[in-house]
Amino acid sequence: MAAGFISTAWIARALGPEGYGVLGFAVAFGSYFALATVFGTDLFGIREIASAPDRAHKLVSRILGARILLLVCAVFLYLLSVWIIDRSQDVTIVLLIQIIVLISSAITIDFLFQAHQRMGPIALRQMGAAMAAMIAVVFLVQSHNDLYIAAAIPCSAMLISAVFLALFADRRIERLRISFSRTGIKDVLISSVPIMLSGVMSTVLLNVDVVMLGFIRTAEEVGIYAGMARLFVLSTFAAHIISAAFAPALAAESDKEDRRRIYYRYVRILIFIGAPLSAAIVAFPEWLVILVFGAGYLEGAPILALLGFAAVLSHLTIAPLTALIAWRDQTAQMIILSAVAISNVALNFCLIPIYGGIGAGIATLIAQALMLGLLVYRVRSKFGFFGFGPAAGAIGCAGVAFIVVIFAAKLLSGAEGLSSHWTLPLLMVFAGSGIYIGLTLFFGVVRRGDVIALNHVLRNRDSDNRNLNEADPTDGD
């Protein structure tokens, strides 16, 4: 997360809003084809391997075979699409560089390690790729003239790390084979279709705003919004790591009471981490923009504040999204995400021509609120689970903590040595986080058992989930 933060800041400053807009558009456009290459087989693999580990070898070989065939189709359609949209030379070349992402998506086998609840190798792969990309960016990207290098570095780091993880898996986990069995691939694809469609809709939610801005507005406006959207994605990075740890635990557990305990604990941990991050973004958007991107992106501060509110809702949606896949209710998830994605496209279509990036931010916020409402309704009506009471408490504690530090920042803004753009906001963020932790502990929003469970699941302990479903005497809605 730290390396991605530094890389984002460096690239955005070096390329400027216009160059970063070209890069942001290409990444968003290519993400749809990368998703088609994976086709939902990662989540399918996690669920099936976690519930039947003895079938892992057969499942992995079929998934890899399906992905190779999908990769060929995706590359063909991608090249055709790049030719049809006929953008400028810079945009076209950066779009072609994104083919590396399609290849790395096809050979990434994180799902195998997640299914076995072995998060260490995945962490090493992600950290290694992020650090290598950061170092390369700092040394090789200096100005707008390095646009192509800036586009190629993250893609190449992902590809190299995926190759190394596959080699490690072949030696330590399962002998990797590729099966082109017609029946096997058909079974994988049919089972993955609802998951894939859900993924497409989820990607629409995340990227349609940047793509639509790229077709309607200037590259500079796209660059400013893409930078704010990148910070929005980075703010949920820790939550997605936790999701990778909890997904197999939810899939492997069949007892309803144990499922309830794991799910409630999952919700509490996600929002405990996400609430202060989101509150800090909302409280100090101008400072964060200047810190990361520089004064040239300051017009994006109101957009970032809107996305900070959306980030709170995004953290709340992660648990029910994961649960519906783990509990084989992926069709309902697909329907919900489709409805929300269509609404998001319509909102962007109406708001972007009038309000630009602000309109895109409003559309994202409304879409996240709609998705949360539909997901909570489905999980509660289908499975009888809720668990969002403590989450609301965490959000309330974060709001109080950062309202206090906003007023404190105003009072101290004239103090000697504290009034710089760097010192005071940084101190206030630390102070707000400290107040938040104190409030959550005082009101019992997060519990000692939650922290112990998270520690165990992230350190690859207790594959039978004893720490995750350990009874909590205060557990409840």
Image (spheres, grey):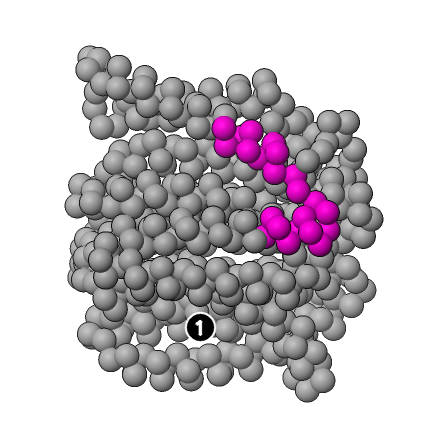
Q: Residue at x 74, y 73 (%)?
A: 58
Task: Tell me the chief SS of the magenta region.
Answer: helix
Please state which of residues 172 and 33 is positioned toward the viewer in this rendering.
Answer: 33
Count all numbered tags in the image, as a single digit: 1
Give coordinates of residue 476: x percent, y percent. 71, 33
- For mark 1, what is the residue? 33
Give coordinates of residue 182: x percent, y percent. 68, 87
The range drawn in magenta is 375-396
Name the amino acid type tagged 1. Phe
Q: Quadrant of residue 330?
A: bottom right
Give coordinates of residue 22: x percent, y percent. 25, 63
Q: Is residue 148 magenta?
A: no
Please state which of residues 419 and 378 is positioned toward the viewer in this rendering.
Answer: 378
Can see residue 125?
yes
Q: Is residue 394 magenta?
A: yes
Quadrant of the image for the N terminus?
A: top left
Q: Residue at x 68, y 61 (%)?
A: 329
Can see residue 23?
no
Q: Residue at x 26, y 19 (%)?
A: 410
Asked whether, in this view, residue 398 is left or right of residue 307, the answer is right
Q: Secondary structure at mark 1?
A: helix
